[in-house]
Image (spheres, rainbow, N blue to C red):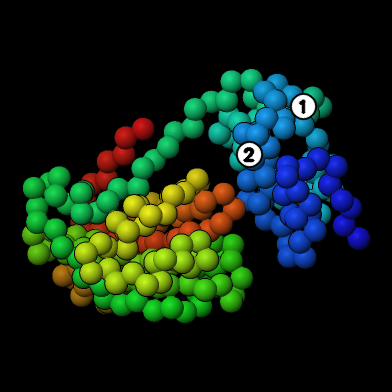
Amino acid sequence: MTRAPTTTDDGAAEAVAGARVPISFRTIKAEILKRIHARVWQPGELIPGEEDLAREFGCARVTVNRALRELAEIGIIERKRRAGTRIAEHPLREARLEIPVVRVEVEARGAQYRFSILSRKRMEAPEPVRARLDLPADADMLHVRCLHFADNRPWQFEDRWIHLAAVPDIAQESFATLSPNEWLVKNAPFSEMEIGLSAAAANAEEAALLALERGTPLFVFERTTWLLDQAITYVRMLHPPGYRMVSRF
């Protein structure tokens, strides 16, 4: 039997703790941030321990631990062994990355931009994508594949999964004038982003799309975004050799 929470913010914790689905660390992280922003917990204040929070949210202690660990990594809370967890007196400013618009990126290089939607389909996502987004098998998803060009030469192949519960308006978007990338930048605010950078050899399809030989090394950029505990999108972007990524903080 789930024990009722002892500390709440407008009933949010009761709804979380009483839910029958497993509680994710993102849900707990979002609730803690809500309480901090609402000044339920003040700067310098000692907050309940992991066991108490796990009991409140009706989840495993390891789930609470991950939420607190991520908040500590960005300077929102301070954790000391045997001394407990406190809200930081002066939270560190978190470095925030802006999501680049591919059109702007191409035009800044003096090239002419265009894009082409290769496919779009409303469907269930495969298990690896659901795992990244922490979504159930029946989550309503939009799968869009898009090819971006610079001076009519392939610039980027975009393979994107969009969680329609987070951005339902995109289901009706034609992408006639805005690419999926630009539409989401304009219409889908996010609070958390995860980025992965890697290299991969182009398979037959990727090589054909990017006008390369099969096996050519590609720059692979993966990005996942959330709004609090709500997954928004996972995208895998492939660039041919010569691409250079620049980020400013």
Residue neighbourhood size for the residue with mark 2, other residues' Cα within 10 Å, grouped as few (<14), some (14–19), many (≥20): some
Task: Please report the residue visible at 46 percent of the width from the left and 62 percent of the height from the top.
Answer: 167
Instruction: Pick the quarter of the image with the C terminus.
Output: top left
Residue 208 in view (yes/no): yes
| Residue occupying image coordinates x 34% and y 76% | 120
Residue 201 appears anywhere in the view: no
Residue 236 occupies quadrant:
bottom left
| Sequence-first tag of 1 and 2 | 2
> How far apart are the alpha carbons under marks 1 and 2?
15 Å
What secondary structure is found at the residue carrying circle 1? loop
- What type is the residue that disc 2 sits on? Leu
Q: Would you name the residue on which mark 2 appears?
A: 33
**Left/right of residue 73 with respect to residue 210 in the rendered view:** right
Query: On the image, which quarter does residue 77 sit in?
Result: top right
Q: Name the residue under label 1.
A: 46
x and y percentages locating residue 231 in the rendered image: 53, 58
Q: Is residue 178 left or right of residue 20?
A: left
Amino acid carrying mark 1 in the image: Leu
The x and y percentages for residue 70 are 61, 40
Residue at the front extreme of this rendering: 10
